[in-house]
Amino acid sequence: MRVLVIEDDRKVGSFIQTGLAQEGYAVDLLTDGTDAGDQARTIDYDAVVLDLMLPGRSGFQVLRDIRARKPSLPVLILTAKDALDDRVAGLDAGADDYMTKPFALAELSARLRALLRRGGPRESVLRVADLEMDTIRRKVKRAGTPIDLKPKEYALLEILMRNIDRPLTKALIIEHVWDIHYDSISNVVEVHINSLRNKVDRGFDLPLIHTIRGVGYVLTESPS
Amino acid sequence: MTMSLRARLAAISMIVFGVLLASLSVVSYEVLARQLDADATARLSELTEGLHGYLRVDGDTASVAFDASDNDQAAFVHEATRYYQVYDAGTGRLLVASAGLTPLARHWTPAEVQAFRADPTPVDIETQYGRLRLANDAGTWPDGRAYLLQVGMFLGPMDATLARYRILLLWRVPIALLAAVAASWWLSKFALLPLSRVAAAARAIDVQTLEQRLPARGVGDELDLVVDAFNGTLGRLERAVGEMRQFSASLAHELRTPLAALRGEIELAHRAAGTSPAERDRFASQMEEIDRLTRLIDHILTLARAESGQIRLAHAPVNLTDLAGSLVEQMEPLAAARSIELRWEPSDVVVVDGDAGWLQRLMINLVDNALKFTKENGRVVVRVFRDGDAARIEVQDNGVGLSPADTLQVFERFFRADPARSSSIAGAGLGLSLAQWIAAQHGGAVAVRSRLGEGSTFTVALPISTPSGAS
């Protein structure tokens, strides 16, 4: 997987590069948008991470350059502009996702994964150890015993199971599970994780849901 | 002063006209009265002086002799002798008196005759038939005896004229005054009409339409001066707000980029292979602090954008009851985690015109606030109901409550009732001021009733959009 990162702040760019490289991506870093269009055409990237405020050429122009050559290349906008208008403008201009700074690396990689997986087949039955989720009948079993989940708990478990072994940030979970802006209530996720743990992990020797402090939550059989 | 400018103009013109009319009336009355009086006195002295020539004396009686065939003489004597009497100046005896004086019984004692001689100025005497003016004039008979001629004239007609004139004035002044007030009320409406137009145009300008200007009428009058001054103020305001917008945009960028770099480097160190659990803990704590700082920046920027008019709200029918119901359902686990009972008591289906996302945020902030300040085993009740033309959202808790002084400040930015105690409670004291802004954007307001130690009730009142909202 090869990712093009266009970010003018060298420190931000370099930690994205390091972080994504650690996860197995090949990362190219550009600090301005002048050559972005050409580079996107000549090299077969799987995704682009694009800052909006760039010297020389604005992120929106770069986005148009890329779109002109590679209409289906996933582009994730990463910007300090957080106003709703900017977000809408970014998505309208053809971006596939939008993230504001500061952000968690874990979240960036989760979003990239989601973009890269897009269009791929979605399994209807998810399995992790002895935990099983039937996404068509919306039924969850652990060791063959049905578990009764509330809708939010189910949605939370589904996103965790679809990202097995990968930590998810609270912000990402809130965006996907809740349809409301919960920024002021930081513990809404914790509370639901707790109740989910009570139903999924309690009474079993192998806990599946883990907290990674400072980052978020992960569902895994083998915590590091 | 609560009077309108128009009413004040009318009142001022009433006072000015009133004083003017009253003083004019008094002056004209006085002038007329003096003139009439002077005319009467002059006529009387003419009659008195003229009559001397027709007087004849014969021992103890006097008489008037004239040529009856001379119309002028006859007319003069007839007029002069209507009320007259002649006294002997030495003895004070009455020599002759006209029949007209007799019913008035105005004959004088010798002492009085002497007094009239000494001071011959005319005297006015009140009689049952009206005011009688008597002129005195001394004369000497051909035989050397002195006499006093007294000629009278009734001032009744003059007094009646003056009385009529007085009545006329008394009627005229209030009527003229009323007419003047009505006219100035009516005129001021036209004079003030451009002012009302300017006021309406100024009212239509808010923080989102600061680029607008009031139309100058180009006639160069005082109102145009006001319009110019107001437009100047608008220009300065527009620049200031523009700078504020620019500032919040650059602040966002300038703060977020280094924070992103900082957080990213910590995250890399956190996940690095050689990091010990203790270090990992420290890095995690640093990331938590950065996340907290980020949320704070988000809140401040949201408020700054809101107040500089950069946020435009949608206008669509929003079912408040459904919105609050689903919100309570989603927040229930939060309450349960702290053993707080979150109760949902809807009574009407209420629909308002507004922005569902922002209204949701408003309710989240209120419920979140209530949960934060309610102790374990406490209770938070959310109600949505209709109250006349208003939709009401009520969030009631039996938590720590607020002192009366704190109640007044609770919507201010960064307000915390007790900094020492609430430092452990997350949040920067911006949620309620954002809630107040959201309510205001919907034409409503948030109010609070609270008692220290007994809990608080926050009530949002919003105008209802559809009259058929009640269930």
Image (cartoon, helix red, strand yellow):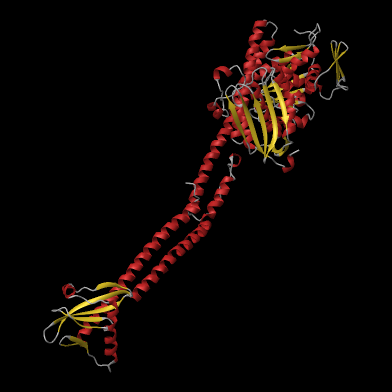
Q: Quadrant of the N terminus of chain A?
A: top right
Position of A121 relative to B77 (above/below): above
Name the residue nearer the viewer: B119 or B421: B119
Position of B107 relative to A173 (above/below): below
Left/right of residue B375 with respect to residue A44 in the rendered view? left
Q: Residue A169 at x, y = what percent?
A: 72, 18
Q: Residue B236 at x, y = what percent?
A: 52, 40
Position of B315 relative to B274 (above/below): below
Q: Residue B411 at x, y = what percent?
A: 58, 29
Could one spot residue B400 in this view of the protein?
yes
Position of A36 relative to B218 (above/below): above
Name the residue nearer the viewer: A157 or B122: B122
Q: Residue shown at 56%/33% (left/top)?
A: B244
When asked about the image quadrant of residue A105, the answer is top right
Name the residue nearer the viewer: B49 or B444: B49
Q: Residue furthest bottom?
A: B69
Could one spot residue A57 in this view of the protein?
no
Q: How many marks?
A: 0
Q: Residue A88 at x, y = what percent?
A: 71, 32
Name the residue nearer the viewer: B155 or B110: B110
Q: Residue shown at 14%/85% (left/top)?
A: B141
Q: Residue furthest left?
A: B144
When asked about the image quadrant of residue B48, the answer is bottom left
Left/right of residue B179 with respect to residue A20 in the rendered view? left
When asked about the image quadrant of residue A59, the answer is top right
